[in-house]
Amino acid sequence: GQQLNQSPQSMFIQEGEDVSMNCTSSSIFNTWLWYKQDPGEGPVLLIALYKAGELTSNGRLTAQFGTTRKDSFLNISASIPSDVGIYFCAGQLAIKAAGNKLTFGGGTRVLVKP
Amino acid sequence: GAVVSQHPSWVICKSGTSVKIECRSLDFQATTMFWYRQFPKQSLMLMATSNEGSKATYEQGVEKDKFLINHASLTLSTLTVTSAHPEDSSFYICSAYRGLAGFGTGELFFGEGSRLTVL
């Protein structure tokens, strides 16, 4: 089915660094959501975006809804060890036939530099 | 954020038995819930859409007789894995959709997930 292209697939961080990841799609979305998943747990909603161009922050997290409605990015500033995990973007298509289903990106695995 | 509770968080069963997983939205009513399956190091794979008061809609390739879904109330959906086999072992996650004003705008809140191991 429909897939979002999320990149990078994985990244190593050092404490204090800024982290950035993004998602792109060939389809237009009405909503972009960003989630974080820790091992053995369900994803937790971090930020929700509903308007093209919208820039929203949640603590050290900042996400933007692209003006074309086909992309979004998530930034984490001054990373800390607990930022490790898998981050997923998700979008809700702007067509009624899609119902309320969300399409998920493949995930970005954030790891700590050894 | 809203709270979605999933139970049990893990279950081990013998091959051939059936297992039921419950998903509850604790602080909002969800007309739509979703069931996902997740394999190690992969993204979430949508199995089915559960609509309150009607039959679930299954994604292509998901056996509806194998994975029975019931959405009896606005706060509860259940997934029953019937006659489970080792290949059904996986991490199953439910989610509840909270719609906002306007078409195509809403938030999806996930349960904690249920790890099923079939021996």
Image (tube, rainbow, N blue to C red):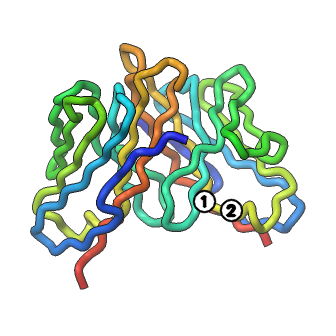
Q: Residue B43, position in %: x, y? A: 49, 55
The answer to whether mark 1 and mark 2 are in CB contact below 8 A is yes
Task: Please count the marks in the image.
Answer: 2
Q: Residue at x 18, y 56 (%)?
A: A76
Image side of residue B54 versus residue A99, left or right: right
Mark 2 residue crowding within 10 angstroms, few (<14) / some (14–19) / many (20+): many
Residue situated in front as seen by the camera: B53 or A2? A2
Q: Which residue is mark 1?
A: B91
Q: CA distance from mark 1 to mark 2?
A: 6 Å
Image side of residue B41 versus residue B56, left or right: left
- Disc 1: host chain: B
Of helix, strand and loop, which one carries label 2?
A: strand
Of helix, strand and loop, which one carries label 1?
A: strand
Amino acid carrying mark 2 in the image: Leu
- Disc 2: host chain: B
Q: Residue at x 12, y 57 (%)?
A: A77
Q: Residue B2, position in %: x, y? A: 41, 36
Q: Residue B39, position in %: x, y? A: 58, 62
Q: Say which label, 1 or 2, has the lower sequence index.
A: 1
Image side of residue A28 versus residue B113, left or right: left
Q: Residue at x 44, y 36 (%)?
A: B108
Amino acid carrying mark 1 in the image: Phe
Looking at the rendering, in which quadrant would you find the C terminus of chain A?
Answer: bottom left
Looking at the rendering, in which quadrant would you find the N terminus of chain A?
Answer: top right
Q: Residue B42, position in %: x, y? A: 50, 61
> Residue A5, relative to residue B104: is it above or below?
below
Q: Which residue is mark 2?
A: B116
